[in-house]
């Protein structure tokens, strides 16, 4: 959408027909990369992300290894054709930043001390982008790490929220922002938590929100996170139920 | 005791300070929670999760199948399908005395050679030593080499090696199962042995596996 | 890393005309092609060749033509060896292998005149459509050239051309197809021991020393790429070319089903 729409919210509906607290249709596919130790594809509406874990494995070069724990690295990669205007392959500044916060979101939940001197490589590939890609990637990465048998205190679950305007320009808090809402909305927040420990592990925002709006959005996102968390657990358990 | 169920990381298994968190679990307040995806297992007071995936972590005395990665002046570096590479010292390669000034180490074990060895020692910093000296330890030169999920190895071996014994008997194959997820099969009905091992690997989380595998093997025998 | 037991196994089996996965010497693995898998791309395909999987997307942008061909559109082909697809692939800029494969695919599309570049000209010397074919490996088990060429063809033949409205590129509700003229396919052969095999797995690639990839369109050879450290004989070359022509017919059937 090249020109700014007059509204993103009207008659209690968002542009794609959702309510403020609706998340898009979600789908999970496990074990999509057979060569990886663990992998999953998560789809939120038109956003599709594949995450794959290699490791823990031998760290090369050795001097980068940490003496007392594993190094958890992430590489977030947006495929060239995942977006409207072709993106040049390879990481830009945006991808390097997202890779960093993605790795950090998992460092407090993974028992890194169980694998000193090794590396855990987490690859997050956005094959189709329609906003909320880093958070969709976080959900996929959580599943990939669990499937890889990596010990964790908790899974990690995320849902975005933001502020969208109506025809009068009044802001409304909504969850799981899509592309037009991300592009034209008044604020958006990437938000992920570790349900079992209760900690918030990823938080990034741009835009402008009151403290009340933030609290409201977070509350709405927390409700959706409960649902996504259950979906993650089910997908992991189904890996073994199905093979019966 | 029918206490096994599939649990996910962070999931509460049982509450109470009387219980002890074992492998694959951690304590959080009064709860014992799963750390890994696997089957929960409560025996007396010990709570464990039997993992269904994950890398091989070397343990002393484990039999493993290694692949020579590098030949150095007086030792070899060995890939043991683990986050840690192992080293085989000169004295652990052969019953014969080797002298690095006279013997070519690459003639004893060359790059790519497959060696049944044993974990000799694992230091705190995860330096791993392996040895090829001991009964049954040797270089393998033929047959088929399988890669399976290391976490499924205990089921493939079975209680007191009952499962692998049964497969050997029914297929007539020589089978060596490395704890690191590498299995060598040679002689006999290699194809059937591989098929059965893959079946156990895929169904490692189910109970009553010995009986169903026995039935399967006997069915295959009748078919022949 | 190849171990000597598997290597010996591959070589011994080949002596009897057999392969590790039970295939015959001249047999491809199962092929699955799915198109229109990425809605943001103007054309896309997912190809599974045994355990090798590639995702191909076609994007069409507005651009300036090259000075030496002012009335022709531009074709660019890229390939990324995604580090998630194989534990031996590393992050970072494309290395020799990725660049070689992408150039082979590029040649097959270009020399096979698959895209009618003259129809991509909007204003000679000023505005043309630039077609980007990007291949990403999702899971690697050998023979990327054949899988990626199939993917590129499937993505191109289903690709749509954007519209230009007041100098703005519109990519919604596209009807007009990209001007595609025929299809080409590739068959890659390896010499392992003294046998020539088609559609190699990763293990077979690791066991081999010479390779020849052949791109075929309408029964004609449109691209050739030798690789590896040893040569092949005239007789082997002849055998490969004949087999490539034969395989091309079968491979085209997979594309035509789309």
Image (cartoon, coloured by chain):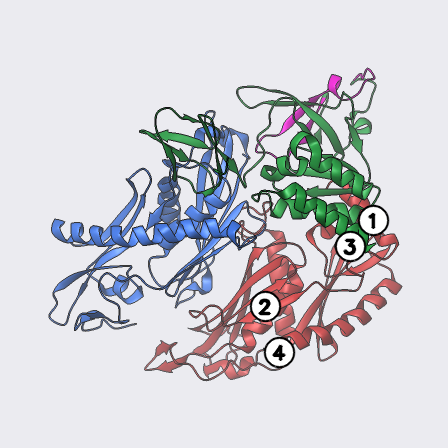
Chain colours: A blue, B green, C red
Tag of residue C11: 1
Q: Position of residue B178 (x, y in %)?
A: 68, 33
Callouts 4 and 3 on one subunit: yes
**Quarter assignment of residue A201:** top left
Instruction: Choose mark 1 or mark 3, whichever is in front.
Output: 1
Q: Which residue is mark 4?
A: C257
Q: Which residue is mark 2?
A: C151
Badge 1 or badge 3: first in the primary sequence: 1
Badge 4 or badge 2: first in the primary sequence: 2
Residue B156 visible in the current orientation: yes
**Quarter assignment of residue B64:** top right
**Element under label 2?**
helix
Q: Which residue is mark 3?
A: C210
Q: Are marks 1 and 3 in contact (CB under 8 Å)?
A: no
The residue at the far front in this view is: B1
Instruction: Choose mark 1 or mark 2, whichever is in front.
Output: 1
Instruction: Choose mark 4 or mark 3, whichever is in front.
Output: 4
Instruction: Choose mark 2 or mark 3, whichever is in front.
Output: 2
Callouts 1 and 2 on one subunit: yes
Q: Marks 1 and 4, how far apart in space?
A: 36 Å
Badge 4 or badge 3: first in the primary sequence: 3
**Element under label 1?**
helix
Viewer-side residue, B186 vs B34: B34
Mark 1 burial class by Cα count in 10 Å: few <14, some 14-19, many 20+:
many
Q: Marks 2 and 3, how far apart in space?
A: 24 Å
Mark 2 belongs to which subunit?
Answer: C
């Amino acid at each position: 959408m090249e020109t700014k729409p007059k509204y993103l919210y009207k008659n209690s509906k968002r542009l794609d027909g959702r309510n403020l607290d609706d998340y898009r249709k979600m789908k999970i596919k496990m074990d999509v990369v057979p060569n990886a130790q663990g992998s999953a594809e998560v789809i939120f509406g038109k956003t599709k992300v594949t995450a794959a874990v290699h490791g823990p494995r031998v760290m090369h070069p050795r001097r980068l290894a940490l003496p007392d724990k594993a190094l958890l690295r992430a590489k977030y990669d947006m495929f060239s054709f995942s977006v409207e205007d072709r993106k040049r392959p390879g990481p830009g500044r945006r991808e390097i930043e997202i890779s960093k916060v993605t790795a950090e979101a998992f460092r407090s939940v993974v028992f890194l001390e169980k694998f000193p001197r090794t590396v855990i490589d987490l690859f997050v590939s956005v094959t189709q982008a329609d906003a909320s890609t880093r958070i969709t990637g976080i959900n996929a990465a959580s599943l990939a790490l669990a499937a890889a048998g990596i010990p964790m205190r908790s899974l990690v679950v995320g849902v975005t929220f933001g502020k969208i305007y109506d025809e009068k320009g009044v802001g409304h808090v909504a969850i799981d922002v899509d592309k037009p809402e991300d592009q034209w909305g008044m604020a958006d927040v990437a938000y992920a938590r570790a349900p079992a420990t209760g900690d918030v592990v990823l938080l990034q925002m741009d835009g402008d929100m009151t403290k009340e709006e933030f609290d409201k959005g977070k509350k709405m996102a927390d409700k959706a996170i409960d649902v996504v968390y259950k979906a993650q657990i089910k997908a992991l358990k189904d890996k073994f139920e199905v093979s019966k | 005791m029918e206490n096994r169920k599939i649990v996910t990381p962070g999931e509460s298994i049982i509450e109470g300070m009387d219980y002890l968190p074992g492998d694959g679990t951690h304590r959080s307040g009064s709860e014992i929670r799963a750390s890994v995806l696997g089957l929960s297992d409560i025996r007396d007071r010990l709570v464990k999760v039997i993992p269904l995936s994950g890398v091989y972590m070397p343990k002393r005395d484990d039999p493993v199948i290694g692949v020579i990665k590098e030949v150095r002046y007086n030792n070899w570096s060995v890939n043991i399908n683990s986050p840690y590479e192992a080293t085989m010292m000169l004295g652990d390669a052969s019953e014969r005395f080797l002298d690095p000034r006279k013997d070519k180490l690459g003639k004893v074990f060359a790059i790519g050679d497959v060696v049944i060895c044993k974990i000799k020692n694992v230091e705190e910093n995860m330096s791993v030593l392996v040895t090829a000296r001991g009964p049954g330890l040797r270089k393998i030169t033929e047959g088929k080499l399988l890669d399976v999920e290391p976490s499924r190895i205990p089921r493939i071996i079975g209680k007191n090696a009952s499962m692998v014994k049964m497969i050997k008997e029914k297929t007539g194959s020589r089978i060596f199962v490395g704890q690191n997820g590498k299995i060598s099969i040679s002689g006999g009905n290699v194809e059937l042995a591989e098929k059965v091992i893959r079946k156990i690997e895929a169904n490692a989380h189910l109970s009553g596996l010995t009986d169903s595998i026995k039935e399967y093997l006997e069915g295959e025998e009748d078919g022949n | 890393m190849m171990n000597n037991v598997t290597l010996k196994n591959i070589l011994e089996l080949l002596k009897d005309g057999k392969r590790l996965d039970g295939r015959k010497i001249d047999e491809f693995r199962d092929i699955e092609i799915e198109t229109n898998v990425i809605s943001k791309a103007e054309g896309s395909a997912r190809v599974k060749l045994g355990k090798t999987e590639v995702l191909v997307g076609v994007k069409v942008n507005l651009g300036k033509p090259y000075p030496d061909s002012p009335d022709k559109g531009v074709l660019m082909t890229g390939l990324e060896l995604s580090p998630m697809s194989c534990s031996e692939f590393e992050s970072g800029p494309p290395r020799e292998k990725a660049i070689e494969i992408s150039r082979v695919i590029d040649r097959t599309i270009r020399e096979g005149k698959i895209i009618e570049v003259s129809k991509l000209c909007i204003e000679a010397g000023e505005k043309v459509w630039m077609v980007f074919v990007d291949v990403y490996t999702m899971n690697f088990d050998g023979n990327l050239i054949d899988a990626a060429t199939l993917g590129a063809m499937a993505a191109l033949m289903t690709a749509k051309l954007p519209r230009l409205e007041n100098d703005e590129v519109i990519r919604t509700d596209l009807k007009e197809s990209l001007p595609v003229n025929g299809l080409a396919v590739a068959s890659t052969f390896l010499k392992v021991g003294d046998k020539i095999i088609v559609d190699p797995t990763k293990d077979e690639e690791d066991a081999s020393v010479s390779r020849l990839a052949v791109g075929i369109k309408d029964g004609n050879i449109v691209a050739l790429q030798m690789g590896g450290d040893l040569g092949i004989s005239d007789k082997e070359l002849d055998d490969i070319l004949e087999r490539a022509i034969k395989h091309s017919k079968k491979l085209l059937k997979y594309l035509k089903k789309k």
